[in-house]
Image (cartoon, rainbow, N blue to C red):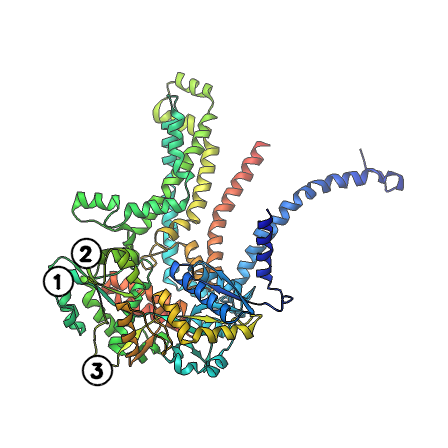
Amino acid sequence: MPEAPAIPATHAPRPRRSRRALAPWLFLAPGLAMFLIYVIIPIFQSMWVSFYDWDGLSDATWVGMANYVELMDDEAFYVSLKNNVIWLVLYMLAVPAGLMIALFLNQTVRGIRIYKSLFFFPFVISQVVVGLIFSWFYAPDFGLLYKLIEGLTGQSVAILADERLVTYGIIAAGLWPQIAYCMILYLTGLNAVAPDQIEAARLDGAKGWKMLWYVVLPQLRPATFIAIVVTVIGALRSFDLVSIMTSGGPFGSSRVLSYYMYEQALSEYGYRMGYGAAIAVVLFGIMMIFISGFIWKMWRDEKGVR
Amino acid sequence: MKLSTTVAIAALMATVSLPAFAQQRTLVLNTDASDPAPKAAFDQLVADFEAANPDIDVVVNVFDHEGYKTAIRNFLTADSPDLANWYAGNRMAPFVNSNQFTDVSDVWEENGLKESLAPALSSMTIDGKQWGVPYTYYQWGIYYNKDVYAKAGVDAGAIKTWDEFVAACDKFKEAGVDCLTTGSKALWPIAGIFDYLDLRTNGYDFHMQLTNGEVAWTDDRVKAVFAEWAKVLPYTTQNHAAIDWQDAVANLVQGKAANYVMGNFAVAAFKDGGMTNDNLGFMPFPEITPGLARAEEAPTDTIHIPAGAKNVEDAKTFLAFLASADVQTKMNDTLGQLPINTGASVGEDPFLQQGFELLSTADGGIAQFFDRDAPAEMAKAGMEGFQEFMVKPDRVDAILERLEKTRARVYK
């Protein structure tokens, strides 16, 4: 129906239409306001602070790119960056490991729910507790792993005091709950796998790896996607375990970017807000690479459905 | 129900500190005295002060000891109390330089504190003014296990020089014991070792210049300190980087280690572990460069008046009260530490007696502690460097280069 020319009598439908256009925004407004105040504005504030030299008490002085220039020449920054990469790569092991356990647990045996909950248990307990448990596990003189290595080789190693091993030691602790998380994602995904397709594949003679690769995994794609997303984000914000287990030590060799940022900006010996903010901006940039990738994929998938 | 409302109103009144209640003036004190002994000492102090000044009501806000270090930055700028705990030396410099503390030189002048609190005068002075009142300090030194000394056949009383100490370490090694134990997970315990090595090798003035950023870390005199340190590294507990200072206390208590460079607060931990005055010993850090004036390490705790204080008048009365000999005697009896006031008396405890003797005869000077004498950033980088050196002594040159780079940036 073509639009009539603007005659006073026909202006009645217009408010209704604009009301219809306005209504979603009204409902979105509280959420958008929150998002703006707590996410968008702070992002730009961090970027702004990163151009200043500020201890949080005195007046801030504008230093331009000086914080970033210093970052480029900071050994501790490169150590943190390297550790972040190690975290990202090794944390990915949680995805296949979670899948294996999920496949293993996806059967109908008496009491399977109990086993499932037991496997899920590490994800339920706090990261702080996980960190403490693993610290004791590695602890020199009384730690279980320490004693085990000592018993086998006669010479033991304090993993959290060794600059070459410490990051791997912390990642191992982080993998424990992360595998459980991926497992639960895959377990729910496996519930949605169509039994008739399995049946049909079986009639066609597929089994073992081929069944897994060509029939089950494609149906698990949504679960895989979410598992990778949470694992990448989990690896990049790996702060709590580092803080609990080593405080970045020995001599800063287990720092990651998020911990280094905290140390520079907020810890007892820090209060270099500008420098901390500069680290935060770099970390944000790295996260943005992954986040835009994920958003692009989701957007493409959604368009594909329509 | 009624009770909780009253409590709520009381809490409200405490935070707002209404000027309308003029007859009963309030004084708000923020403190980090969350551990049992400091808490008891502060309760006693406040009760005594209120008894002496019935028209003043002191409201105490106790913060967790570690959390306080962050909290103070918030409450100084946002909702300032009338009095706040902090530390002497460079540790108070950020607050003094950003005008967060009030100059209390008049309190020092009027009460003759420059004489009575003489040991802490230099560490309380910035730009020729005093910025707070110190009430307690404690000595650092070497605590040792007498049983281990007896077992290894070493006479503790005969160790006067660093060479004799290193020679003794050899004997401990033969006996299968770590000569020196420490836990560097939290970094600060090893700063005590560095401070003493530097104080004994180069003296107080050099140490102050170094922590003030006036000397390069690549200076030969600094390298000499690390050379002395390298001598005892083979005899130091191997996994120190993985353990906390309390774990190292266990090493000494169980006889796995002979010596521990620590502050006097560790005595309580040694005794909790089962040691007594009979088998726990204390000795001053041995001499390295002969003839050097003996300097000691004694971190000082202080109370300041924030710039935003509402009741400055009464806060100054409180500081004068805190500085008096009787008050410091009583308070430090409870704290188990040493009073600053030269007229105060020291408790019966043998370690306190030795500490008092040690500090009052230190002709070289009293250092605060590495992380209080050096600015925070330098302290952090320095302590990390010390830890790396203890694990990888061959990297000493690279470490010192890095510290020099930090120095160039920190002291602008």
Q: Is residue B315 left or right of residue B394?
A: right
Q: Amino acid at mark 1?
A: Ala
Quadrant of the image occupied by residue A258:
bottom left
Residue behind mark 3: B291
Residue B35 position in % (x across, y down): 40, 59
Q: Earlier in the sequence, mark 3 or mark 2?
A: 2
Q: Is residue B116 shown above or below B151?
A: below
Q: Does dot 3 land on a helix, a strand or a loop?
A: loop
Give the residue drawn at x 48%, y 74%.
B319
Q: Residues within 10 Å of mark 3 (few under 14, many from 20)?
A: few
Q: Amino acid at mark 3?
A: Gly
Name the disc covering residue B256, or none. 2
Q: Earlier in the sequence, mark 2 or mark 1?
A: 1
Q: Chain of mark 1?
A: B
| 3D distance between C-alphas at marks 3 and 1 | 30 Å
Q: Residue furthest top?
A: A203
Q: Are marks 3 and 2 on the same chain?
A: yes
Quadrant of the image occupied by residue B362:
bottom left
Residue A201 position in % (x across, y down): 41, 20
Do the residues under discs 2 and 1 have CB atoms within 8 angstroms?
Answer: no
Which quadrant: the C terminus of chain A? top right
Q: Is residue B324 left or right of residue A9?
A: left
Residue behind mark 1: B150
Give the residue drawn at x 54%, y 36%.
A301
Q: Amino acid at mark 2?
A: Lys
